[in-house]
């Protein structure tokens, strides 16, 4: 009787774990609110230059939430964090984050999404 009860408990625990994994996986497959906006930035010629160790760059990416994977981003730091990639040296990137726009203008700061929308003409979803 005790062994049967333990089996039922384990089956219930496994079912709860499986349900949790399913829910997490299904949430990740949903598109982010800013997917189209982030893609549009690249289509309009905006490029975000940053470094993995830069807290302001992390804040900029965080503003996009799960849509950050679609930002037109260029990593400027070498893996050891001690130097800059040749691409960023050639582009004259001196600080992070730096946004470079199609018209050649630059802005070296964490830019609010509303300003990115104004600068590029990309439509920002209403609730942002």
Image: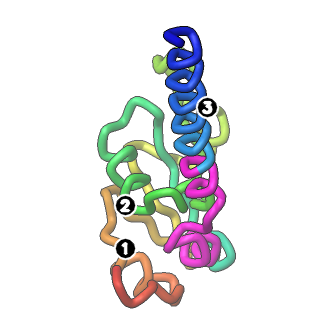
* Mark positioned earlier in the residue sequence (3 or 1): 3
What is the distance, in whole Å, between disc 2 and disc 3 at their CAs?
Answer: 25 Å
- Closest to the camera, between mark 2 and mark 3, is 2
* Mark positioned earlier in the residue sequence (2 or 3): 2
Front position in the image: 43 or 101: 43
Q: Do the residues labelled 2 and 1 touch (CB within 8 Å)?
A: yes
What is the distance, in whole Å, between disc 3 and disc 1 at their CAs?
Answer: 27 Å
Whether residue 81 is in magenta: the answer is no
Whether residue 24 is in magenta: the answer is yes
Which residue is the site of mark 2?
63
Q: In which quarter of the image is residue 88?
A: top right
* Mark positioned earlier in the residue sequence (2 or 1): 2
Q: Residue at 32% x, 50% y: name it.
A: 59
Residue 124's spot in the image, x, y percent? 45, 84
Which residue is the site of mark 1?
113
The stretch of residues the image draws in magenta is 23-41
Q: In this view, does 14 lie to the left or right of 116?
A: right
Q: In this view, does 15 lie to the left or right of 125?
A: right
Q: Quadrant of residue 125?
A: bottom left
Circle 1 residues within 10 Å: few <14, some 14–19, many ≥20: some
Callout 2: helix, strand or loop? loop
Which residue is the site of mark 3?
85
Q: Residue at 51% x, 29% y: name it.
A: 13
């Amino acid at each position: 009787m005790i062994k049967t009860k333990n089996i039922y408990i384990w089956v219930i625990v496994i079912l709860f774990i499986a349900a949790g994994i399913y829910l997490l996986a299904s949430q990740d497959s949903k598109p982010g609110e800013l997917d189209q906006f982030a893609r549009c930035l690249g289509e309009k010629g905006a490029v975000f230059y940053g470094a993995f160790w830069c807290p302001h760059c992390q804040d900029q990416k965080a503003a996009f939430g799960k849509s950050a994977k679609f930002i037109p981003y260029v990593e400027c730091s070498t893996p050891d964090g001690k130097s800059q990639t040749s691409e960023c040296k050639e582009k004259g990137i001196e600080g992070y984050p730096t946004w470079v726009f199609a018209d050649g203008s630059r802005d070296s700061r964490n830019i609010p999404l509303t300003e990115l929308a104004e600068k590029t003409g990309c439509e920002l979803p209403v609730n942002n």
